[in-house]
Image (tube, helix red, strand yellow):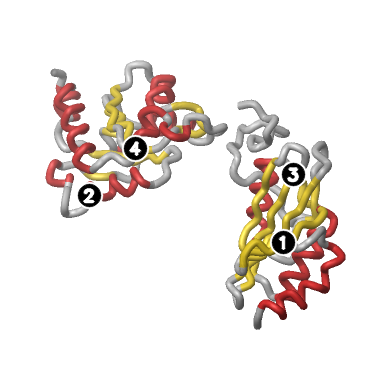
Amino acid sequence: MSWKTWSLKKSVWVFHVNTGACNNCDIEIVNLLTPKFDVERFGMKLVGSPRHADALLVTGVVTRQAAPRLKEVYRQTPKPCVVFAIGACACDKGIFHAGYHVVGPVDKIVREEDPNAIIAYVPGCPPKPEAMISGVVKALSAL
Amino acid sequence: MNKKELDNKLSGIRDKLLGVEQTSEKRMYLPCEAENCYSVCKFLFEEVGCRFVIVTGIDAEDCFELLYHFSYDQLGCIVTVKTFIHDRDNPSIESIAQILPGAEWIEREIHDELGIEFKNHPNMRRLILADDWPEGVYPLRKDTKK
């Protein structure tokens, strides 16, 4: 394990990107920070800039307007970083699959920018906070 | 204020309507042609005292339908002005945003999605489509392919 990966797995700071979600997944993400789940005990916290982040939490299907912005946010995140596709829409378009403004699920857009991106999927509509914690743990232990 | 007074007030624009449909105590439809829509909405707002709610745009294949929803709060009755635009190549209608600024954004949205021109709209810019969306493609028209 390189020292970069080793240091990535400690105290993951996350940046939250909404690429066109209905806000339900976003509420569940905020729920992670409440005293009941309190992910800050693992050193995880939401940061205000992708330049400070180790992981991106992407919610929602990627719309035509949001796709170049998601790529830009991914470009600005220091590598190595992990992209978490949170929710059914981010994983595979979900109920919006036939929408005229939809360009693709999160993994497709991020892979256009970086084919070797590390992407973890947490399905659900919205996923439970427990599922998100489990997804993060599984992704980090697979690194 | 009761139902009778609402009916009496509406008699002032009866000649501009194609009819009056009352489906229940709290729901009323006023079908009219596109050229009369502005004056009917103005009458409902200024003379009757209805509150503007929202506009619905529908592509009905042979024409475009615009449903202007008003609420008559004293009776809790929703009054809907149902307008038909038959010209599919150049659909246009008078904007009601001149008298009802609250209608400005929904008219811009309908212009984006269905391509209906609102005449004398104060600020007809793109509202909800992506910046790189091609001009002249209206996603919610029935004949638009994805």
Mark 4 touches mark 2? (CB < 8 Å): no
Q: Toward the viewer: B63 or A46?
A: B63
Q: Toward the viewer: A53 or A25?
A: A25
Place residue B134 in its image quadrant. top right
| Element class at badge 2 | loop
Marks 1, 4 in one chain: no
Amino acid type of the residue that numbered disc 4 sits on in the rendered structure: Pro
Residue located farthest toward the top when viewing the structure as drawn: A115
Q: Position of residue B54 (x, y in %)?
A: 62, 58
Amino acid type of the residue that numbered disc 2 sits on in the rendered structure: Leu
Real-space Cα distance between discs 1 and 2? 53 Å
Marks 3, 4 in one chain: no
**Depicted A65 relative to depicted B45: above or below:** above
Mark 1 touches mark 4? (CB < 8 Å): no
Q: Quadrant of the C terminus of chain B?
A: top right
Numbered tag placed on residue A33 in the rendering: 2
Q: Label 1 lies in what chain?
A: B
Q: Nearer the viewer, mark 1 or mark 2?
A: 1
Real-space Cα distance between discs 1 and 4? 57 Å
The residue that disc 3 covers is B64
The residue that disc 1 covers is B21
Amino acid type of the residue that numbered disc 1 sits on in the rendered structure: Glu
Crowding near pointer 3: few (<14 within 10 Å), some, many (20+)? many
In the rendered image, is residue B97 in sight?
no
Is residue B78 left or right of A47 when viewed as pictured?
A: right
Q: Position of residue A73 (x, y in %)?
A: 40, 33
Identify the mark nearer the N-term, 4 or 2.
Answer: 2
**Depicted B78 relative to depicted B124: above or below:** below
Q: Label 2 lies in what chain?
A: A
Q: Quadrant of the N terminus of chain B?
A: bottom right
